[in-house]
Image: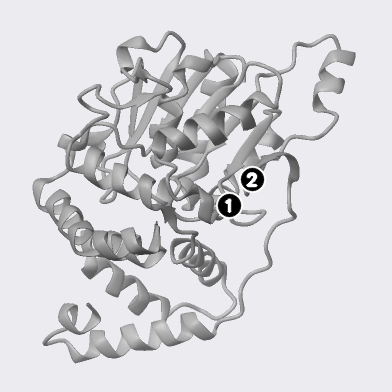
Amino acid sequence: MLWRETHGDAELRRRAFQGLSRYQEATRPKPPPAPRVAASVRNSRLLHYGTENSLKTHKSQGVTAPFPIVFIPSLINPPTVLDLSEQQSMLRHLASLGHDPWLIDWGTPEQSENGLDLAGHVEQKLTPLISAIGRPVILAGYCLGGTLALGLGGLSPAAIVTIASPWNFDGFPTESRDEVIRLWGEAKAVCARLGYVPMEVLQSGFWSLDPARTIRKYAAFGDMTSGSHAEQAFLAVEDWANEGPPLTFAAGAELFDRLYAGNATGLGQWSVGGRPCRLDDLHCPTLSIASLTDRIVPASSAPVLAENWTLGLGHVGMIVSGRARELLWDPLSRWLSKHGG
């Protein structure tokens, strides 16, 4: 990809190789303190970012405690994008404002889970983890996590928020959608034999959406000041983007065959626990947040909910960029407070 995208531009190629080498050799920033593990189901965990005494404090002051807000990340890449560092953490920021955030950590699937499809993740993992909280919750899903959150409508959540989440796959540009389906067609037989979908297969699909940008960002990284905030932020985001457990084969097949190729969610043909998941059946406050510059999940593929916001930040930038607090974190905090979170 690098050779193809820098054809005829030897200087860009040199800078990209230099940036890639620097990325491989750089000292990584210290991770933030680990949150409390509140519950687990096999290798998946429920992490708590609020204080352990938050509920007790609210009750002692005669104030109704806010609804817990359960953030559901994508099955692709680790959940740490929502908690990259103490400075780049939407969850810690919301906790500092008095909210009670929780986070699903999907973990690495066990070999016995290879037959677990997307609906199975909702039924067998999300439902028991969220039920362990023992109170009504607000669901907030990022990327594919928002798609899964919409499958939890049967739990009667207090509210649902989706952030950069796909629902109507007919809203993807034809060229990029066809490319993802083509790459899956090439990898499917090998993945079936393995019983899972390796991260490398998923990453190649992401790169294919905007290969020129991938090359440019590494070229720019080579010019960053060593030890700067920009360098540390780049390392944290890129490590997140290049890491992640595999998908179970069943989840990958459902994602690519039924959602990307068949638009099962957009057509109301995706079911969880035998119940078709249709947006018209949601009976709680709902908010869809999409980005007008998102190349991974275009705004035209987002679910249309009771409230719909659009931002001018990218798929990852809306969570971790320098303007994320101003354009997403704080407005979301106000919306959550309005709805009891």
Q: Is residue 23 above or below residue 341?
A: below
Q: Is residue 145 above or below residue 86?
A: above
* Residue 314 visible in rendering: no
Q: Is residue 15 above or below residue 129?
A: below
Q: Which residue is mark 1?
A: 107
Element carrying mark 2: loop
Res 98 → quadrant: top right
Quadrant for the C terminus, please.
top right
Answer with left or right where residue 284 lies relative to residue 130: left
Answer with left or right where residue 290 lies relative to residue 109: left
Do the CB atoms of the residues marked 1 and 2 lie less than 8 Å apart? Answer: yes
**Residue depth check, mark 1 versus mark 2: number of the one nearer the observer:** 2
Q: Amino acid at mark 2?
A: Arg
Label 2 crowd bin: few (<14), some (14–19), many (20+), radius 10 Å: few
Q: Nearer the viewer, residue 94 or 70?
A: 70
Answer with left or right where residue 341 lies relative to residue 149: right
Res 58 → quadrant: top right
Res 31 → quadrant: bottom right
* Residue 194 visible in rendering: yes
Q: Amino acid at mark 1?
A: Gly
Residue 307 appears at what percent x and percent y? 36, 18
Q: Nearer the viewer, residue 293 or 21?
A: 21
Residue 80 appears at what percent x and percent y? 57, 53
Answer with left or right where residue 321 lies relative to residue 132: left
- Seen at 23% across and 57% down, the residue is 184
Q: Nearer the viewer, residue 80 or 132?
A: 132
- Seen at 40% across and 38% down, the residue is 118
Closer to the N terminus: mark 1 or mark 2?
A: 2
Q: Which residue is mark 2?
A: 42
Element carrying mark 1: loop
- Seen at 22% across and 77% down, the residue is 1
